[in-house]
């Protein structure tokens, strides 16, 4: 499986009135682009596991976090990772 996600961040969308997780994606050699994670997940041919989605949202801790870090890469570390790391 190819991982097109290079990074992630959380932004407050004033028009939606909520915080949205965005991912930086690059499919070929074009410039990377930030899009909402929900949009990325709904693209045809893109299937994220529950753990991968949780990793990019910064929701994993402990051993699950270490496992996801090894699997999905060190390019991004969630901003709310546990302080013991």
Image (cartoon, rainbow, N blue to C red):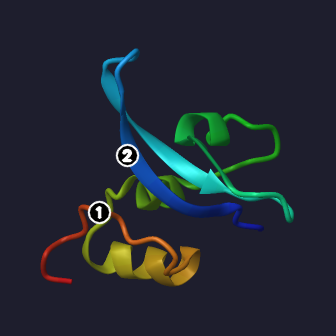
Residue 44 sits above or below residue 73 on the image: above
Q: Within 10 angstroms of label 1, few (less than 14), some, or many (20 or more) residues?
A: few
Res. 65 image quadrant: bottom left
- Alpha carbon distance from label 2 to label 1: 9 Å
Query: Considering only vertical position in the picture, is 46 above or below 17?
Result: below
- Residue 69 image label: none
Would you say 42 lies left or right of 50 here?
right
Quadrant (top left/top right/bottom left/bottom right) for the N terminus: bottom right
Which residue does the image show at 24% across and 61% down from the upper left? 80
| First of labels 2, 1 by sequence position | 2
Which residue shows up at 31% across the image and 80% down it?
63
Where residue 32 sits, quadrant-wise, is bottom right
Q: Residues within 10 Å of mark 2 (few under 14, many from 20)?
A: some
Percent from the top left, x then y, of residue 60? 32, 64
Q: Residue at x 58, y 55 (%)?
A: 49
Which residue corresponds to mark 1? 79
Q: Which mark is residue 10?
A: 2
Q: Which residue: 37% across, 46% down?
A: 10
Q: Cβ–Cβ below 8 Å for labels 2 and 1?
A: yes
Q: Name the quadrant of the C terminus.
A: bottom left
């Amino acid at each position: 499986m190819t991982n097109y996600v290079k990074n992630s961040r959380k932004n407050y969308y004033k028009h939606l009135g909520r915080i949205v997780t965005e991912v930086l994606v690059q499919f070929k050699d074009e410039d990377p682009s930030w899009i909402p994670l929900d949009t990325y997940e709904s693209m045809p041919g893109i299937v994220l596991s529950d753990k991968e989605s949780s990793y990019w949202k910064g929701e994993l801790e402990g051993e699950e976090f270490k496992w996801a870090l090894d699997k999905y890469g060190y390019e991004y570390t969630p901003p709310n990772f546990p302080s013991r790391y």
